[in-house]
Amino acid sequence: MNVTIDILVFRRSPKEKRAKMNQIIETAGLKNVNNVYYQLSVAEIIEHALRNNEGQLSEKGALVTRTGAYTGRSPNDRYIVDTPDVHNNINWGKINKSISEEKFNIVYEKMIKYFEGKNTYVFDGYIGADPKYRYSSRFITELASQNLFCNCVFRKASGEQLNDFKPDWTVISASHLSLNPKELDINSEAAVLLNFEKKMILVVATQYAGEIKKSIFTVMNYVYPGDNVFPMHCSCNVGEDGASALFFGLSGTGKTTLSADPNRYLIGDDEHGWSDDGIFNFENGCYAKTIKLSRENEPQIWDSIKFGSLAENVVMDPETRVLDFDDGSITENTRASYPVDFIPNALTEGVTNHPKAIVFLTADAFGVMPPVSKLNKEQAQYHFISGYTSKLAGTERGITEPQAAFSTCFGAPFMPLQSYKYAEMLTRKLEEHDTNVYIINTGWSGGPYGVGERISIPYTRAMVDAVLSGEIEKAEFWVHPVFNVMVPKSCPGVPSEVLDPKSTWHDKAKYDEQAARLAEMFVENFKKFQNVDHLVKQGPQVPVNS
């Protein structure tokens, strides 16, 4: 077995280094691998990816790759191993599907055999910016580009940390291994298997890096509540005054865009924990959706797609190497990952104070939700449990246009515990810190998807600014007759007619019809939750004549 490792990582003899590499691989059960590339520098990783024909460099130096058949997460291929120690804790169902230990072991043995004679790339790092709550993780991939992704997104262990590094969790990704669905009684040749007992995640047959990111996020959503940390699918930034804000939402609703605010300091764009000490980022990088990205509207993200970043499925001119962010011919779910310090005003320590404001982001495909509205604490509970949004094209396999969806906690695909447990944690935090909560609709106005237009980013930013500065509180509010939320009549930088969703529709009767239809979906969805009957009156109200 050949070994490639920076001599500064371990001041040991070649024999000692080889023994260390053997130990690293053997802890994951792998054996007889060819080359082990461990904790490479970014430049070295990119050199490997280019030699492996995994991608090309853009004009600005970003590594541009294509992820093959899987250009988004494949939720139907994700399974949790049903073991006695977790059986009673998991919210089993369509999202958290079970698989037996026996089948996990079959896949694991296939991966061990698959890696024999192959190169492996190993990244050791941490989940959790706050050392008090962090978890060590080892990521083993066959692709250098996925190793670059880990370097972009997670916190890299270095120096003395590596001498005694012991992973709490191990993730192994075999992107080109295919499974037999009939043999394992699974949905396809791909699988993402989470084994909480072995503390191991297997990612098979998909090159899409988001599977690595979201599988370890799922793990954190399982373990952190036991540490009295509220895990959240949200972005976070903080103002000059030290007041932080959280933005909840599914992929594509604006978490990354709105948190990358040149007038505020970025903590993180996607995953955070809320402890008794404050907010901390799980990661150390960003994973931005780039379709329709423009330097005018999102300059910080635009400028971050450079050497050291990874661009997935973005169309590139073969001659000029210029990226075309408007081209969705490969997928609407084009992505870029980059370290958080690529954002000029990011706080790389990744920790901040308790939030003064929370924003629930929804991309309403019906085009009927108010662009901005305020919630009382009971309404905040209702909408957190409901988690209404639209799944946007490409974020999941098979989604080709926006679809209305209810995703509990604004992240149901990643929440393995019962939803009420997360809702209870939110409630306690709101009460302890008197945090204001708002809904901002980043979806459509003037009609549903295909008829209306997406609410402009400048308008959305103006609404966010008003929420975070407190200016929104100076407005006169009215109660929406269907959605039962407080809607401001004015907001700096936003035309008043935009704030009233009905006024943007040419056919007012059609608006009423669509609003009633969405309200009925809220009511029907909420019936499946237990012990929350007292919140029903806080949600949308179906008109009597609907």
Image (spheres, helix red, strand yellow):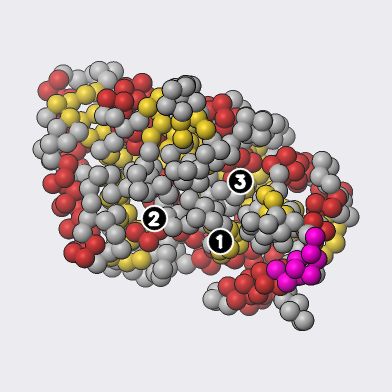
Q: Which residue is mark 1?
A: 403
Q: CA distance from mark 3 to mark 1?
A: 16 Å
Q: Work out whether residue 296 can be spotted.
A: yes
Q: The disc labelled 1 sits on which kind of residue?
A: Gln
Q: Nearer the viewer, residue 394 or 209?
A: 394
Residue 470 vertical placement versus 50 (above, below): below
Q: Which residue is mark 2?
A: 74
> On the rendered structure, is 483 left or right of 497?
left
Residue at x 80% of width, y 53% of height: 499
| Main secondary structure found in the magenta portion | helix
Q: Are marks 1 and 2 in contact (CB under 8 Å)?
A: no
Q: Earlier in the sequence, mark 3 or mark 1?
A: 3
Residue at x 18% of width, y 26% of height: 3
The label nearer to you, 3 versus 1, is 1
Look at the image and say whether residue 510 sits in the magenta stretch.
Answer: yes
> On the rendered structure, is 215 left or right of 100?
right
Residue span colored magenta: 506-514
Q: The disc labelled 3 sits on which kind of residue?
A: Gly
Q: CA distance from mark 3 to mark 2?
A: 21 Å
Expressed as whole percent of the image width and height from the top left, the position of residue 316 reads 46, 31
Q: Which residue is mark 3?
A: 254
